[in-house]
Amino acid sequence: MPSAPALVVTDLFAGYERSFVLQGVSLTVTPGDAPLGVVGESGAGKTTLLRAMQGVVKPDRGSVTWNGRAVHRVGRDKKLFASSVRRVLQGDLTEPERARTVTKLVEEGLKDARKAGRTVNRSVEELLDVVALPRHVAQRQGYTLSGGERQRVILARAIAGRPDILLLDEPLTALDPAMRGDIAANIAEITQDLGTAVVLVSHDLELVSRMTDEAIFLAGGKIVARGPVFATLASGEHPELRELAAAAPLAVQRIP
């Protein structure tokens, strides 16, 4: 089988209303890569980067390419790109989706994987285990679930689709912090098994640290550092990093 194409960000300048949120960002994500975190203060450009990688935000300068083509105009390969690179937002189920059972919702992801020629040798119940949802939830309709439960169903559906690259934008905001860590470990394990590269954006530094061995640090729209979350923050090499470190003093102090 040929290797899946990488998602390549090259000298990216992008933003809104002629204001650059990202300035000269370059990054390559290859299917099978270890999970990568994206860290930075609010307004640093984290979500804009994921939106550009998905093709929602068009570059003002530079490029984001997949299979050698600009992601905002993949044309006839639009469905293939959507199945290969999937973004999970911190949002909610749509109204039509809320009327479906959890089983139906997760099965949609499994069907997407089969259509794309991928196999996921896991049942709906096993995928619910990954996101720490009890198996009896499978027969419930979306509108009966809490916000945190719906977030986890969305995540299970995305994993079921076995994308080559999974872009996670604050995927577990509605959950208790202790539960986030367990789910992060499960996601890291199953995506590694499936060969899915994960890019994780989150303000929760503990979550990013648990799920990734390395993160890029954005400040002023630029990548100012790259490395393990708390070790990089402890270095204090950039003013914005020192501010992030000040918000997580106990975690940073654990670093020798």
Image (spheres, rainbow, N blue to C red):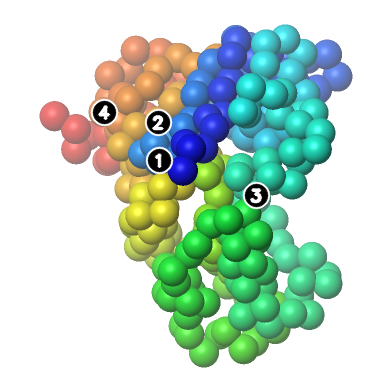
- Label 4: how many Cα within 10 Å (few below 14, some 14–19, many 20+): some
Labels 3, 4: front one: 3
In the drawing, what numbered circle is on residue 83? 3
In the depicted structure, whether residue 72 falls above or below residue 167 = above
> Residue flagged by tag 3: what amino acid is it?
Ser
Provide the residue designation for mark 4.
Answer: 231
Choose top left, top right, bottom left or bottom right for residue 101.
bottom right
Q: Do callouts 2 and 3 mark residues in contact (Cβ within 8 Å)?
A: no
- Label 2 element class: strand
User: Could you tell me how far apart the alpha carbons at marks 1 and 3 are, in whole angstroms?
Assistant: 16 Å
Disc 2 marks which residue?
A: 215
Going from N to C along the chain, the mark reached first, 2 or 3, is: 3
Left or right: residue 95 compared with residue 50: right
In the rendered image, which residue does mark 1 sit on? 32
Q: Residues within 10 Å of mark 1 (few under 14, many from 20)?
A: some
Which one is in front, 92 or 153? 153
Depth check, mark 2 against mark 3: the one in front is 3
Label 4 SS: helix
Picture quarter with the C terminus: top left
Outermost front residue: 1
Q: Are marks 2 and 1 in contact (CB under 8 Å)?
A: no
Q: Earlier in the sequence, mark 1 or mark 3?
A: 1
Asked which secondary structure carries label 3, the reply is helix
Say if residue 247 shows up in the picture.
no
**Helix, strand or loop status at disc 1:** loop
Identify which amino acid the numbered label 1 is placed on. Gly
Find the distance from the CA under tag 2 to the CA under tag 3.
25 Å
For image coordinates 76% across by 31% down, the residue present is: 74
Relative height, residue 24 to residue 97 (above, below): above
> Given the image, on which type of amino acid does mark 2 rest?
Ala
The residue positioned 53% from the left and 57% from the top of the image is 118
